[in-house]
Amino acid sequence: MNVMVMKMNGFFIIDKPKGITSQGAVLKIKKQFNLKKCGHTGTLDPDATGVLIVACGEATKLIRLLEENQKEYETTIVFGLDSNTLDVYGTITQESDMSFTLQELDEALANLKNQALQIPPMVSAIKVAGKKLYEYERENKFVDLAPRRVQIERIDRISELRVAEGHLEVDIRIVCSKGFYVRSFARDLGQALGGCAILKDLRRLKSGRFSVDEAIKLDFLTEKNLYSIEKIFDFTRVEVNDFVAHLVKNGVMLDERQIITKEPFYILHNGAIISIYEVVGENQYKPVVIFKES
């Protein structure tokens, strides 16, 4: 049985265009569909494009369950340039000649694949002392950043080295973990080759199981493109009686008398989903979402 939980509780998979922030895309959707709650997972920079998952209504409470998803990117990296934003859209702070062979590039890529720690860029939204890094960068304030643990699943060089506007550049495809910054990867690659490097283009091809081929352009988005919560999350379903349903609607915790599991699950009453619960302890479960009756 495929039950739509509530009319606008779900997810849009959009292909974010250049020139708009991820939050800008969210606000456009919020206005178009007259939504009270709307959010996204996996920020894309204004000049980056590709898959952005936007949650609507009660689905915003489930965003964190998608944040662990792997991401796949395709990027063009240009060598011999540095900028304050680690891409060509920032202020160029260094320009130099770089020369290396394709073999040296491939060796550097192979070494970086095993990179376990990465220093985030100053233009990221990571908070330090309650303030986002890009806010410090705008104020020209330096912040000493600790490396963060990341994982690269795969790196593929998808082009030959070429020269454009006097600088070597190459196209790379990367599959990586949550929290990985491709612009930091470009910086590290440039340094590994004895110089500097920044991003020229960035496109997210996949976020979890969703690819850019399934994503909808913002200007063509309709209500029919909304994925229901249950289409995104294939959780176990637990049907409950009237007594337990009353408890669930009041946010009462559940235990092994209802289910034994280590994963989130749906609570159904008379065939309709009324809540989603998650594990908080040994056979202890609390509600993530309690759906209001429409």
Image (spheres, rainbow, N blue to C red):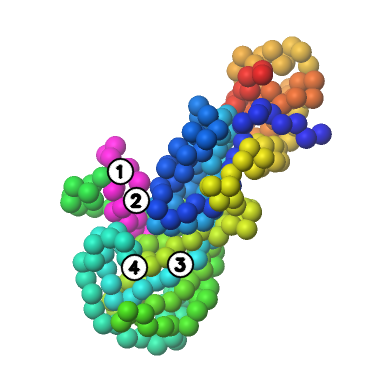
Q: Position of residue 210 (x, y in %)?
A: 62, 53
The region drawn magenta spans 116-134
Q: Nearer the viewer, mark 3 or mark 2?
A: 3
Q: Residue at x 44, y 86 (%)?
A: 103
Residue 39 vs 195, above or below: the answer is above
- Res. 203 mark: none
Q: CA distance from mark 4 to mark 3?
A: 10 Å
Q: Residue at x 56, y 30 (%)?
A: 57
Q: Residue at x 78, y 35 (%)?
A: 2
Q: Position of residue 203 (x, y in %)?
A: 49, 61
Secondary element at tag 3: strand
Identified by mark 1, the residue type is: Lys
Q: Are marks 1 and 2 in contact (CB under 8 Å)?
A: yes
Residue 266 part of the magenta segment: no
* Disc 1: which residue: 132
Quarter of image, res 242:
top right
Secondary element at tag 1: strand
Quadrant where the N terminus is found in the figure? top right
Nearer to me, 221 or 56: 221
Left or right of 282 in this view: 236? right
Of labels 4 and 3, earlier in sequence is: 3
Residue 122 part of the magenta segment: yes
Residue 86 vs 77, above or below: the answer is above
Identified by mark 3, the residue type is: Thr
* Disc 4: which residue: 198
Q: CA distance from mark 4 to mark 1?
A: 22 Å
